[in-house]
Amino acid sequence: MEKDFRLLLIAEQTASSVGEITSIVESIQNGFFVVTESLQEGYKEVEVGTEEIETTGNTIRLKILVKV
């Protein structure tokens, strides 16, 4: 009887631990999702900034050529 009780206790502790581990893994996955989204947005902003710099450089070169 005591052995059955100990097995039941171990089973409950195992189930609880699995639940905690699952929660931790889900939290880590959510963190990765947030980081990935932020990085993708940052890359888009860098691309837009690069295009704007290139456009500005081309405009300045054209203005210099027109004056020469």
Image (tube, grey):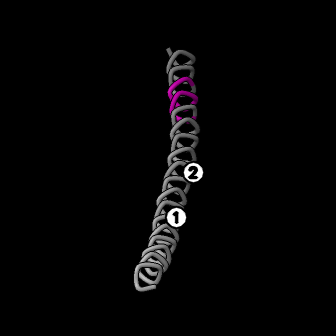
Q: Dot 2, crowdedness within 10 Å: few (<14), some or many (≥20)?
A: few
- Mark 2 falls on what kind of element? helix
Q: Between 1 and 36, which is closer to the camera in this rendering?
A: 1
Q: Is residue 17 left or right of residue 36?
A: left
The residue that label 1 is drawn on is: 22
Q: Is residue 19 left or right of residue 10?
A: right
Three-letter residue code for mark 1: Thr
Q: Give x and y (percent) for residue 52.
A: 57, 36
- The magenta span reads 52-58
Q: Give x and y (percent) for residue 20.
A: 47, 72
The residue that label 2 is drawn on is: 37
Q: Quadrant of residue 48?
A: top right
Precedes in sequence: disc 1 or disc 2: 1
Three-letter residue code for mark 2: Glu
Q: Between 33 and 20, which is closer to the camera in this rendering?
A: 20
Question: What secondary structure is the magenta-colored segment mainly?
Answer: helix
The residue most toward the front is 1
> How far is the residue under mark 1 from the one under mark 2?
23 Å
Q: Give x and y (percent) for residue 8.
A: 49, 79
**From what the image shows, is residue 15 above or below residue 36?**
below
**From what the image shows, is residue 29 above or below residue 12?**
above
Instruction: Indicate whether residue 22 is drawn in magenta.
Output: no
